[in-house]
Image: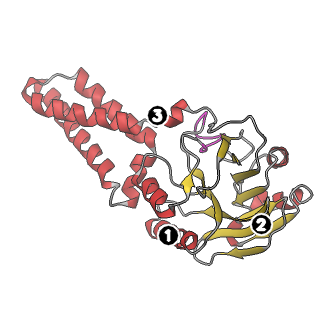
Amino acid sequence: MSLMLALIVLLAIAAAFGAAGLALAGAVSIRADIFNIAWPLKVLAGLAILAVLLLVRAPAQRVGRLAATACAGGLVVTGVPWPMLASHGGLTGTEQAAPDFTVVTFNAWASNSDLDSAERWLRAAGADVIALQEIGLNTSELPQRLIDAYPFQHRCRWGVRLVSTHPFSLTGCSDQLLAAWARLVIDGREVTVTSVHLARPLSPSWYRGHSDALADLMASRSGLQVVMGDFNTGEGGFLMARQDNRLSPLIRVTRGLRTWPSGRLSPAPLLGIDHVWASEDFAVRSVMTGPHIGSDYRPVRVDFA
């Protein structure tokens, strides 16, 4: 029995170092960084290893146990998304004054199960511009349903859309990633708004290509910018840190939000993979996630000054 316990402790020690190595491997591997982005995996791994190390005693491996305990504890501490747990729907800035410019991003999900709820919420959102992703199959009619409230619409391939209450002075699509962009005038100033849907990190070459193309697209522009959509990238990983750096000087205003999965797999969203970046000139009045409206993603609304 003592040999069995010693083997269990040795496996726990190996697992602790292996999991810590996997977390650090995210710095060089897109697939490995999914371990950091999918924070429940990281936290559960750390807790499971800690439980084994605390319950099973093996004095001969005291040094290894202490090192493994530190690794496992580190996984838990760094894995828990403290801003997300402290944020309930998200709020930044103040809400006293009416916003000057409101945007919404929503991955409508091609298998949306409640298009009526999605339509009602988007109508009531009071947005100037809505960025939509995954318009197709069950959601193909959603833009047309909204056309009286958002009469100015721009469509690109693969389900990316922009709908607006303001006319577009210029529009375009990217041939290198899933993105639709449009220029409009808000209070006498030109703003370029982009709807984006990046590939999943599970497909590293696609993800890297989309991320590079988006950075190049943003760098080629001047003036006020808002880029928003489904980035398939969550907080807590190296990929998000790189994305923040590559889109600088744009600032990500969606921090501590949980948007996926909604309505399935989990009683509440766990990951924040839908984001909004904006030029430094914008002052954020509020940031919030919307309710479940048929998609496996929650919508995100940002009020700017």
Kindly identify which residue carries mark 3: 82
Kindly identify which residue carries mark 1: 206
Kindly identify which residue carries mark 2: 184
The residue closer to the viewer here, 188 or 41, is 188
Question: Residue 187 at x, y = what percent?
Answer: 79, 58
Q: Compare marks 3 and 1 and give the one earlier in the sequence.
A: 3
Q: Is residue 191 left or right of residue 231?
A: right
Predominant secondary structure, magenta span? loop
Mark 2 residue crowding within 10 angstroms, few (<14) / some (14–19) / many (20+): some
For numbered disc 2, what is the local secondary structure? strand
Mark 1 residue crowding within 10 angstroms, few (<14) / some (14–19) / many (20+): some
For numbered disc 3, what is the local secondary structure? helix
Q: Compare marks 2 and 1 and give the one earlier in the sequence.
A: 2
Q: Report, in whole angstroms, how far the alpha carbon at label 2 lies from the one at label 1.
A: 30 Å
Quadrant of the image occupied by residue 69? top left
- The residue drawn where x is 50% and y is 69% is 206
Amino acid bearing label 2: Leu
For numbered disc 1, what is the local secondary structure? helix
Question: Residue 135 at x, y = what percent?
Answer: 74, 61
- The residue drawn where x is 59% and y is 39% is 269
Q: Report, in whole angstroms, how far the alpha carbon at label 3 lies from the one at label 1.
A: 30 Å
